[in-house]
Image (cartoon, rainbow, N blue to C red):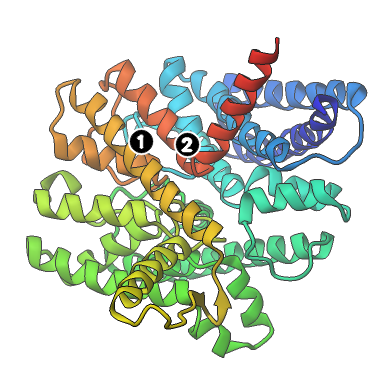
């Protein structure tokens, strides 16, 4: 089975190595320093060599969901290091460079590097990695190797869950990729029309569609702010909805429970934020959409917000974007399931015992396994969030700021109160790195893998 995993992992390494050609060309065009360009070349050579080596000793075969999780997890761990290596060429420490690499591939957007001092090559590299991480490196790989069978299905399932567009096939994956690329191009055009430069438009497009958040704009205002809030809202929706747009099925889009839930939370959250701090409503709306979509752009200084606003945004970040989107958090579908289950339980208590009730979303029955998974995931998120908050606050930071930063990392959002910086203690940086990795794949795959490794160790 391990040699089967190596086959899929080798394909990911091949793809990631070839994908580095884009930042390599960009760095040469903008005149990046030679050591930075050389580091990217080393990344390419190493990834292609390892891909070749793994392919030589691998066996083509089907893999189960646990093994697919392993491929997916490694698809977010390995790129973090390959992204960190070129950044280190500017003299940044390994831990700070790794922090940036993890934040990039997990589409978080938190940074410990000084804003405004980064080279254009580093800024593009981080944005490009967020774009890759948004769709999922392993999912991109599937488009080049997919064939009917459980292995392809399981890797697909590990990334986008059961929100399928068509029966799983190479066509399914290519539809997703075409939507993703098309939206990226549209976003570049929208930002250009908004008045941003070509480079800023490209970087913002890459980090908006991926709900990543690494932007060259420290604060959004004016036309770019209004453009960004609309594009963030769009990016937070399931990619499958854009397939329905292509099919002209507007009714299916407007009735999507995740879209309704997302819009409702945005409305309530923005109104609440406006009254908590009396900030401009446009900024309140922007911050709310940024937090809920887990993009992480900002239009205000978060550290100046009241504790009530910080707690509100922390909660909104954890709720997260649509299931099947590039966003993080618990996901709207699970929030809907949890809400429906609570209402179901209340109705059950009020009605006669022989009354028949069903738990449905969009006319489809919800299995109790899905309900249980949603509540378990919520409990695990809260537990990890509390532990992270306690550890970081023990380093001398306020409880509210520690909660805000932990929520931002775990939800892969990127909003910050200024706590993330090069002065952040090593332990706190490590906690946030782990949170970002956990949050990108929703924690449970790591727990399953740890459990499998423990079982393997116990046998020996």
Mark 1 vs 2, N-terminal side: 1
Residue to which mark 2 is pinned: 438
Q: Are marks 1 and 2 in contact (CB under 8 Å)?
A: yes
Residue to which mark 1 is pinned: 384
Specify the quadrant that holds the C terminus: top right
Q: Secondary structure at mark 1?
A: helix
| Residue drawn at x 41%, y 22% as measured from the top left | 96
> Against 242, is 446 above or below?
above
Camera-side mark, 1 or 2 = 1
Work out whether residue 91 or residue 348 is closer to the camera in this orientation and state it: 348
> Against 332, is 257 above or below?
below
* Residue 52 location (% of width, % of height): 86, 25
Specify few, some or many for label 2: CA neighbours under 10 Å numbering under 14, 14-19, or 20 or more. Answer: many
Work out whether residue 299 or residue 357 is closer to the camera in this orientation and state it: 357
Q: Classify residue 391 as left or right of residue 9.
A: left
Res 253 quadrant in image = bottom right
* Residue 348 location (% of width, % of height): 35, 75
* Residue 46 location (% of width, % of height): 74, 21
| Residue drawn at x 20%, y 56% as measured from the top left | 312
Q: Classify residue 45 as left or right of residue 325.
A: right
Dot label at residue 159: none
Q: Residue furthest top?
A: 460
| Residue drawn at x 13%, y 32% as measured from the top left | 398
| Residue drawn at x 33%, y 82% as measured from the top left | 351
Is residue 204 in view? no
Distance from disc 1 to disc 2, alpha carbons, whole Å, reads 9 Å
Res 177 quadrant in image = bottom right
Is residue 237 in view? yes
Specify few, some or many for label 1: CA neighbours under 10 Å numbering under 14, 14-19, or 20 or more. Answer: some
* Residue 136 location (% of width, % of height): 63, 47
């Amino acid at each position: 089975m391990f040699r089967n995993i190596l086959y899929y992992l080798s394909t990911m390494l091949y793809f990631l190595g070839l994908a580095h050609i884009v930042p390599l060309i960009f760095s040469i065009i903008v005149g990046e320093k030679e050591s930075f360009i050389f580091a990217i070349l080393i990344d390419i050579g190493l990834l292609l060599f390892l891909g070749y080596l793994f392919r030589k000793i691998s066996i083509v075969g089907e893999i189960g969901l646990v093994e697919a999780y392993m491929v997916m997890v490694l698809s977010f761990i390995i790129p973090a290091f390959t992204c960190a290596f070129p950044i280190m060429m500017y003299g940044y420490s390994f831990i700070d460079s790794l922090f940036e690499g993890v934040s990039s591939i997990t589409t978080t957007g938190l940074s410990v590097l000084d804003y405004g001092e980064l080279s254009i090559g580093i800024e593009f590299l981080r944005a490009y990695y967020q774009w890759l991480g948004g769709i999922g490196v392993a999912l991109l790989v599937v488009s080049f190797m997919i064939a009917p069978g459980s292995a392809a299905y399981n890797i697909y399932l590990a990334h986008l869950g059961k929100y399928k567009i068509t029966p799983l096939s190479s066509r399914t994956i290519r539809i997703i990729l075409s939507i993703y690329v098309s939206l990226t191009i549209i976003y570049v055009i929208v930002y250009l029309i908004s008045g941003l430069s070509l480079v800023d438009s490209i970087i913002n497009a890459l980090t908006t569609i991926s709900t990543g958040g690494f932007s060259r704009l420290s604060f959004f205002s004016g036309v770019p702010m209004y453009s960004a809030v609309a594009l963030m809202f769009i990016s937070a929706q399931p990619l499958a909805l854009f397939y329905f747009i292509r099919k002209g099925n507007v009714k299916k889009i407007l009735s999507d429970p995740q879209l309704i839930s997302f819009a409702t939370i945005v409305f309530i959250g923005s109104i609440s934020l406006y009254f908590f701090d009396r900030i401009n409503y446009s900024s309140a709306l922007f911050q709310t959409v940024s937090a809920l979509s887990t993009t992480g752009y900002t239009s205000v200084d978060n550290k100046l917000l009241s504790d009530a606003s910080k707690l509100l945004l922390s909660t909104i970040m954890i709720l997260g974007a649509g299931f099947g989107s590039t966003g993080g958090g618990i996901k709207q579908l699970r929030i809907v399931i949890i809400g429906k289950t609570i209402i179901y339980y209340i109705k059950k208590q009020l009605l006669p015992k022989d009354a028949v009730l069903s738990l449905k979303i969009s006319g489809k029955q919800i299995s109790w396994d899905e309900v249980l998974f949603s509540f378990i995931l919520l409990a695990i998120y809260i537990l990890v969030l509390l532990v992270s908050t306690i550890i970081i606050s023990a380093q001398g930071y306020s409880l509210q700021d520690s909660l805000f930063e932990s929520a931002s990392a775990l939800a892969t959002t990127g909003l910050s109160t200024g706590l993330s910086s090069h002065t952040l203690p090593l332990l706190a940086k490590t906690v946030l790195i782990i949170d970002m990795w956990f949050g990108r794949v929703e924690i449970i795959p790591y727990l399953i893998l740890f459990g499998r490794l423990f079982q393997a160790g116990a046998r020996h």
